[in-house]
């Protein structure tokens, strides 16, 4: 299962939505890919994810989101148990320093093969690097939420989060802002799916 987010923060596109929509229309051999686009809204996003996991019973969940400051495709290492939103989400929520799951542990590690993802992308000439913080906004929230769901219900699912840089079209009106081409981002996630299936 591959998920992305709708646009937020004044942007009209979200690279994760663009990539998910492109992957949705691709044929994979021996891999059944299902997709979902999540709202950038605190409770609606996690509700949509729980519903999609219950519906599709995926073996692997790869969540994608935009991280506008990144220059590289960034598999995240860890999700932390805190909502601390720098800007309000699209639903107007802006929690400060609140736990995502009050009874949950401080953090969960990704169970995707993040070193292999970086190696495979690098071998394909696509800039990639492990990130040690998914932030404290929606992306970290959905990442933590899914890892907690998997651990607390002992589900046979591997999951993790990959942050994507801006698309070129998003960086054109910003000064000295890194971005990656649409086709490069799509190819990166196609390779990530193949690596995870392996
Ligand atoms: N990026 C945000 C939330 C939605 C998205 O695409 C984040 O990094 O938290």
Image (cartoon, rainbow, N blue to C red):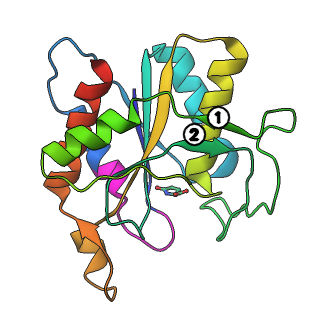
Proximity of marks 1 and 2: CB atoms separated by less than 8 Å: yes
Helix, strand or loop at label 1? It is: strand
Q: Residue 139 at what x, y percent from top left? A: 55, 50
Main SS type for the magenta part?
loop
Q: Residue at x 18, y 62 (%)?
A: 181
Judging depth in this view, the residue of 29 and 18 nearest the camera is 29
The residue closer to the viewer here, 175 or 2, is 175
Residue tagged 2: 143
Residue at position x 47%, y 41% in the image: 161
**On the rendered image, what quadrant is the C terminus found in?**
top left
Instruction: Tell whether 11 sits left or right of 142.
Output: left
Query: Which numbered dot is residue 108?
Result: 1
Counting residues from the start of the chain, the first of labels 1 and 2 encountered is 1
Q: Position of residue 70 (x, y in %)?
A: 39, 65
Q: Who's the residue at 48% across and 46% down the image?
A: 76
Say whether residue 55 is visible.
yes
Q: Where residue 21 is drawn, which disc sits there?
A: none
Q: Which residues are magenta?
A: 8-18
Q: Magenta span has 102?
A: no
């Amino acid at each position: 299962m591959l998920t992305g987010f709708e646009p937020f923060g004044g942007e009209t596109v979200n690279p994760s939505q663009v990539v998910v929509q492109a992957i949705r229309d691709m044929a994979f051999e021996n891999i059944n890919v299902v997709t979902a686009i999540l709202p950038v809204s605190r409770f609606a996003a996690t509700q949509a994810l729980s519903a999609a996991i219950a519906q599709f019973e995926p073996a692997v969940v790869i969540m994608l989101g935009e991280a506008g400051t990144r220059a590289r495709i960034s598999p995240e290492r860890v999700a932390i148990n805190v909502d601390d939103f720098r800007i309000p989400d699209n639903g107007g929520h802006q929690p400060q320093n609140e736990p995502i799951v009050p009874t949950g542990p401080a953090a969960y590690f990704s169970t995707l093969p993040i070193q292999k993802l970086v190696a495979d992308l690098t071998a394909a000439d696509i800039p990639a690097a492990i990130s040690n913080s998914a932030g404290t906004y929606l992306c970290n929230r959905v990442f933590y939420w899914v890892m907690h769901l998997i651990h607390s219900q002992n589900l046979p699912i591997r999951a993790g989060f990959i942050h994507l840089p801006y698309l070129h079209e998003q960086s054109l009106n910003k000064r000295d802002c890194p971005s990656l081409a649409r086709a490069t981002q799509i190819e990166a996630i196609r390779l990530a799916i193949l690596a995870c299936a392996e």
